[in-house]
Amino acid sequence: MSCFTFLKVTMVIFNLLIFLCGAALLGVGIWVSVDGPSFLKIFGPVSASAMQFVNVGYFLIAAGCALLVLGFLGCYGAQKESKCLLLMFFSILLIIFIAEIAAAVVALVYTSMAENLLNTLVVPVLKKDYGEQPDITQVWNSTMEGLHCCGFNNYTDFLDSPFFKKNHNFPSFCCTNETEASCSEEAAASANVKGCFGQLLKSIHTNSAVVGGVAAGFGALELAAMVVSMYLYCKLDKA
């Protein structure tokens, strides 16, 4: 088997797997968007914390569609030896790779800016909907239980919320003893439970080696796929 044939078969199999992963992500994304509470019950607090800061359903749908298109271009382009499809595959993968690098740089350099932006978006939702909208209340309760945190910044995020107005206290997660029947402002201030955004960042920093390893692995796969697609493109150009 020649090098060209081997790389062609590898490209087809690799992109077929990407296509199937995209279909799976698309299916899960639609499920999350339609029936979020069931998703939370199955996957627990980790999914809840993610859903609080990113709309996981729409994100999975977008990622699934992108992988479907990418997998189709790579698989069909290699199988049919189409220069046009291979070039499209390479171009899209290059754009994604550059976007990932840019996102990583922004995440490292502008963490405080991201925190301020999220603060202006998330806290008003807490004050408006916590204790009134069941889905939002459930997401936050799962998040606070899983990360052992309180609110986005601290207990003051729940001031003037429907929950506070109705019960005249804060969620039990904002006090050290979560089994207490009520969590007064004095008890919450004394407990000083950290906000969920800070706890999420702490968890990410704790597992930074794993996150970095996974990111490096994806980057290496993307680079390899770009190299192979360009190799096939150049060989077809000479044929």
Image: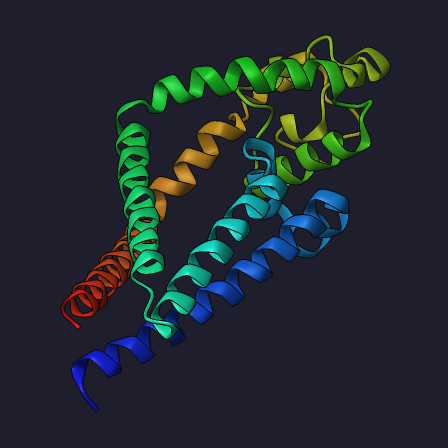
Depth check, front residue: 59 or 198: 59
Outermost residue to the front: 239
Q: Quadrant of the C terminus?
A: bottom left
Residue 46: x percent and y percent?
57, 47
Horizontal side of residue 107 vs 133, given as left or right? left
Q: Is residue 98 visible?
A: yes
Task: Tell me: 142 left or right of 12.
Answer: right
Q: Indicate left or right for 178 with 203 as reference.
A: right
Q: Is residue 87 above or below residue 140?
A: below
- The percent coordinates of residue 230 (x first, y second) are 20, 60
What residue lies at 73% left-to-right and 14% top-to-bottom?
A: 128
- Identify the residue shown where x is 33% and y is 65%: 82
Quadrant occupied by the N terminus: bottom left
Identify the image quadrant of residue 228.
bottom left
Going 64% across and 13% down the picture, which residue do you hit? 124
**From what the image shows, is residue 123 above or below residue 43?**
above
Question: Where 89 falls versus 78 (above or below)?
Answer: above
Residue 110 placement, left or right of 166:
left
Instruction: Out of 48 and 94, give the one closest to the viewer.
Output: 94
Q: Is residue 169 visible?
A: no
| Rendered image quadrant of residue 11 | bottom left
Residue 103, position as x, y percentages in the image: 33, 34
Task: Compare residues 198 and 96 and report the one nearer the observer.
Answer: 96
